[in-house]
């Protein structure tokens, strides 16, 4: 298992070609790994600032995520959110992790949704148009 900085270095970025614009990037991936957490679908939505994430780096990053023995589902969601937020430093970010199988007979659906934004960024017209989960 890699150290945090080594894991985050797997997330490659490039310059935002439209830094003067507010627009939403959506990436969706199926994650595998720790049996208590995965399989799960991750949906990442963000409004880029100076950087955009290179999707071609995600296979290596998710392979590393699959090696981590998470204590619970929420811990995995928080780690993913912190990694993406730290590396792309977006104006706004939303991460949804949706477990693809029931936890047990009592819990048929389990998901975590996290959101963050830069302190002075606000574009309600853009966010209001987004499809709700």
Image: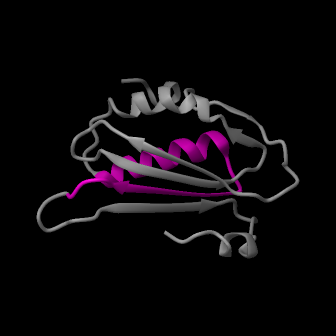
Q: Is residue 88 above or below residue 111?
A: above
How is the model colour-coded?
one colour
Q: Based on the displayed image, in which of its 4 quarters is residue 122 positioned?
A: bottom right
User: In x, y percent, where is residue 101?
Assistant: 24, 54
Measuring 67% from the left and 75% from the top, which residue is drawn there? 128
Q: Which residues are magenta?
A: 73-102
Task: Judge by depth and name the residue closer to the eye, 112 or 7.
Answer: 112
Can the viewer see residue 7 in this picture? no
Measuring 28% from the left and 42% from the top, which residue is drawn there? 70
Q: Is residue 103 above or below residue 52?
A: below
- Residue sitting farthest toward the right: 20
Task: Judge by depth and name the residue closer to the eye, 16 or 55.
Answer: 55
Task: Confirm whether the magenta stretch covers residue 97.
Answer: yes
Task: Confirm whether the magenta stretch covers residue 92.
Answer: yes
User: In x, y percent, where is residue 105?
Assistant: 11, 64
Task: Judge by depth and name the residue closer to the eye, 100 or 106.
Answer: 100
Q: Is residue 55 above or below residue 18?
A: above
Q: Based on the displayed image, in which of its 4 quarters is residue 108 positioned?
A: bottom left
Measuring 48% from the left and 26% from the top, which residue is drawn there? 60
Report whether 55 appears left or right of 122: left
User: In x, y percent, where is residue 15?
Assistant: 79, 36
């Amino acid at each position: 298992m890699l150290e945090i900085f080594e894991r985050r270095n797997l997330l490659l970025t490039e310059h935002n070609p439209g830094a003067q614009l507010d627009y939403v990037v959506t990436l969706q991936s199926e994650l595998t790994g720790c049996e208590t957490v995965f399989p799960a679908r991750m949906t990442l939505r963000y409004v880029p600032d100076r950087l955009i994430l290179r999707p071609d780096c995600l296979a290596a990053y998710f392979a590393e995520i699959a090696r981590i023995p998470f204590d619970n589902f929420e811990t995995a969601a928080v780690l993913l959110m912190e990694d993406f937020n730290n590396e792309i430093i977006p104006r706004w970010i939303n991460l949804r992790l949706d477990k693809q199988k029931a936890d047990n007979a009592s819990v048929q659906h389990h998901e975590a949704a996290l959101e963050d934004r830069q302190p002075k960024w606000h574009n309600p017209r853009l966010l209001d148009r987004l499809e709700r989960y």
